[in-house]
Amino acid sequence: MNLAAAMVDSGSSGQNLTDNNLHKTIILNAVNSGYLSVGNRLDSNGIYILVLGPDVTDSQMCTSYCGYNYYSDQFQYITIGHPSVCPNACIPPLNSQSSPNNSPFIDAIITVLSHELQDILTDPRLNAWVVNNNGHSLELGDFCSGDNTSTDEWFGKYQNASNGASYNLQFNNAQYLVQTIYSKEKNACLLTNQ
């Protein structure tokens, strides 16, 4: 995976995103403007990621989720709400007082992104790797997160950084707290090849 391009949208669709069509419009406008692609073309194999600012709300943010994945006929995308809007729900409890990179909101966004990437890679059109559990559709990332998941299941083996924050992945000189992934073979939530 690599980052192809990034841009800032200063509220082209307003500050309250009420449905998926607004998310799609933001992405299409960004692509058509040339900010996100050479030749103003969508990448049907790409994943577009919307990270909302602290002043932007989403219809179900904080009540149902901190991020989610969805699709159109042409592309897949992830939407992640700004953790400051609902810190008790969207900042991992392990890092509620400090974060590995001293940026609580960015670190929390990375944690949510680690969940949503699992979902979109295994269920890009919401009809692939989904399990129905008591009337709720669960994607791969949902098995290892949420209120009924222990901290060890959610994050696996983690360590404490020098500032007291928790992390379970180190890349270059940065530390991150990412979600585990469900292994059907081992019937467990794991990090990499534990």
Image: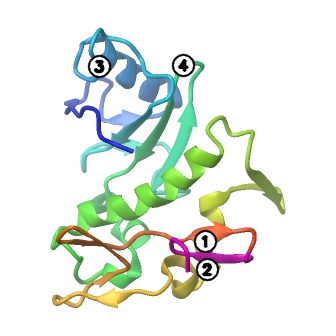
**Disc marking residue 37:** 3
Q: Quadrant of residue 127?
A: top right
Q: Could you tell me how far apart the alpha carbons at marks 1 and 4 are, in whole angstroms?
A: 29 Å
Q: Could you tell me how far apart the alpha carbons at marks 1 and 2 are, in whole angstroms?
A: 6 Å
Q: Are marks 1 and 2 in contact (CB under 8 Å)?
A: yes
Give, as a single range, the part of the protein colored magenta. 186-194
Q: Could you tell me how far apart the alpha carbons at marks 4 and 2 are, in whole angstroms?
A: 34 Å
- Mark 4 burial class by Cα count in 10 Å: few <14, some 14-19, many 20+: few
**Disc marking residue 144:** 1
Q: Amino acid at mark 2?
A: Thr
Mark 4 or 2 closer to N-term?
4
**Disc marking residue 74:** 4
Going 40% across and 65% down the picture, which residue do you hit? 90
Q: Amino acid at mark 1?
A: Cys
Q: Which residue is mark 2?
A: 149
Mark 1 or 3 closer to N-term?
3
Q: What x and y, as percent, mark residue 165?
A: 26, 85
Q: Nearer the viewer, mark 4 or mark 2?
A: 4
Quadrant (top left, top right, bottom left, bottom right) of the C terminus: bottom right
Q: Nearer the viewer, mark 4 or mark 3?
A: 3
In the displayed structure, does residue 164 sit left or right of residue 110?
left
Is-magenta flag for residue 191?
A: yes
Is-magenta flag for residue 182?
A: no
Mark 1 or 2 closer to N-term?
1
Secondary structure at badge 2 equals loop
Going 33% across and 24% down the picture, which residue do you hit? 13
Q: Quadrant of residue 120?
A: top right
